Image (cartoon, helix red, strand yellow):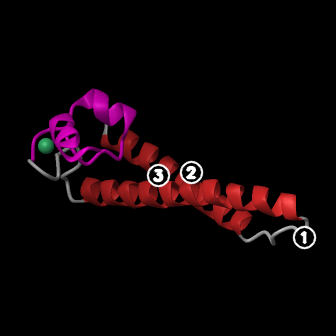
Amino acid sequence: MSQDVKARLLQLQAEFARRAEATQRDLQQPAPQDWDEQAQHRQNDEVLEGLRAEARYELVRVNDALARLEAGRYGQCTRCGAEIAAGRLAAVPQADLCSPCAELTGR
Ligand SMILES: [Zn+2]
């Protein structure tokens, strides 16, 4: 069980790291000369910045989950200590809050 979780988390870690890098690379593309294209470019950058922030945030959560797994605390809510429901962990392996706490904190 925990080996499967670890494999899944490592997979997610690679995926979010790849996404963070890809968006970072796209953001470093020089702006085009054309005015119309520049406006489009700025809009794209805003979207990319959102995606990059999300990828970095999820990467941190995955790393935290891996640390909890090593420490033998994986699957425990970091707020109230309750067991996180198996279905929730299956859907979001990096979840650090049980459903009630997630609702309370708006996550
Ligand atoms: Zn909780």
Quarter that holds the C terminus: top left
Nearer-the-camera pick, 2 or 80: 80
- With respect to residue 77, does 19 lie above or below? below
Instruction: Provide the secondary structure element on which disc 3 rests.
Output: helix
Residue 15: assigned label: 2
Task: Let me know if residue 104 is in the magenta part.
Answer: yes
Q: Amino acid at mark 2?
A: Glu
Q: Is mark 1 within 8 Å of ligand 1?
A: no
Quarter that holds the N terminus: top left
Q: Residue at label 1?
A: 33
**Left or right of 93, for residue 45:** right
The location of residue 45, given as percent across then percent down, is 67, 61
Q: Which residues are magenta?
A: 81-107
- The answer, for residue 14, to whether it is visible in the render is no
The reply to whether dot 3 and dot 1 touch (C-beta < 8 Å) is no
Instruction: Provide the secondary structure element on which disc 2 rests.
Output: helix
Spatial CA span between label 3 and label 1: 41 Å
Q: Residue at label 3?
A: 10
Q: Amino acid at mark 3?
A: Leu
